[in-house]
């Protein structure tokens, strides 16, 4: 796969989403990941040139840094519990606009922000589109868990037909620790026939904080194509 094509498609999707959705005086949710980086620099450019008076709520440590580095106003969900627009990336998107998120490990805060936003806009490149979730994203559904529940939850996930793997840190021995001090299990369920039912089953296990299945939350998706165009899908 051509890296330049991928980066260009992410940038095009991000910039188009920002141009078409960001308006003056908005409270914005700022997602996490590499595609969001392009969105934040476009938001910062528009905020400066058009004096938009935007307030930005982060979904992770990374996105907090992005907001600050781009000179945007950082605010909290405590101050602004109702968000106008949340822009975020995704790992996979299906035909019904359900998505898998959490490849970057930020799914819990991302879901809180998304579910408190009037509009939730997803920006992705052409590799992320599938008929059904689990078709292309084969690293498993990211599930944030309370650390002491790691072993019993792994067993329960296996009984449900999943293959759980504890996500490990990159430059430290042992598990990755999320921004909330928890672990992540990546659980491969293959192609998922009914993501909503699976999500509810997973969320019902004590010790599960939340899953990377975002069901019925997305309002619009911007998908950057190889040829430079952007396809927009709406709910
Ligand atoms: C982080 C996420 C990201 O939005 C998702 O992994 C997509 O990232 P990228 O834009 O780098 O492909 O859910 O938790």
Image (cartoon, rainbow, N blue to C red):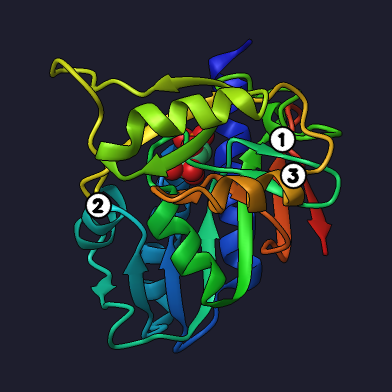
- CA neighbours of label 3 inside 10 A, class few (<14), some (14 to 19), many (20+): some
The mark total stands at 3
> Which label's residue is closer to the chain start, 3 or 2?
2
Q: Is residue 22 above or below residue 232?
A: below
Looking at the rendered structure, which numbered label has been put on residue 195? 3
Mark 1 vs ligand 1: CB below 8 Å: no
At x 52%, y 46%, the residue is 211
**In this rendering, does residue 151 appear at all?**
yes
Q: CA distance from mark 3 to mark 1?
A: 31 Å
Q: Which residue is mark 2?
A: 180
Mark 2 vs ligand 1: CB below 8 Å: no
Q: Which residue is mark 1?
A: 228
Q: Is residue 40 left or right of residue 128?
A: left
Q: Quadrant of residue 69?
A: bottom left
Question: Split into 4 quadrants, where in the image is the N terminus?
Answer: top right
Can you give x and y, in whole percent of width and height, for residue 54 in the image? 38, 80
**In this rendering, does residue 140 appear at all?**
no
User: Which callout, 1 or 2, points to the residue nearer the camera?
Assistant: 2
């Amino acid at each position: 796969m051509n890296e330049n094509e991928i980066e260009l498609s992410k940038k095009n999707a991000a910039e188009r989403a920002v141009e078409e959705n960001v308006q003056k005086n908005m409270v914005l949710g700022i997602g996490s990941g590499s595609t969001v980086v392009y969105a934040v620099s476009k938001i910062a450019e528009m905020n400066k040139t058009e004096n938009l008076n935007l307030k930005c709520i982060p979904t992770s440590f990374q996105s907090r840094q992005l907001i600050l580095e781009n000179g945007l106003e950082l605010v909290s969900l405590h101050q602004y519990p109702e968000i106008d627009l949340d822009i975020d990336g995704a790992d996979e998107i299906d035909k019904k606009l359900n998505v898998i998120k959490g490849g970057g490990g930020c799914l819990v805060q991302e879901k809180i922000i998304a579910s408190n936003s009037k509009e939730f806009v997803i920006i992705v490149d052409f590799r992320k589109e599938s008929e059904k979730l689990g078709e292309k994203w084969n690293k498993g559904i990211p599930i944030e868990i309370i650390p002491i529940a790691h072993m019993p939850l792994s067993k329960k996930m296996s009984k449900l037909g999943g293959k759980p793997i504890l996500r490990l840190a990159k430059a430290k021995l042992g598990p990755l620790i999320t921004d909330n001090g928890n672990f992540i299990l990546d659980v491969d369920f293959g192609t998922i026939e009914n993501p909503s039912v699976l999500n509810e089953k997973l969320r019902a296990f004590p010790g599960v904080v939340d899953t990377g299945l975002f069901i019925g939350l997305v309002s619009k998706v911007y998908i950057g194509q190889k040829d430079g165009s952007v396809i927009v899908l709406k709910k």
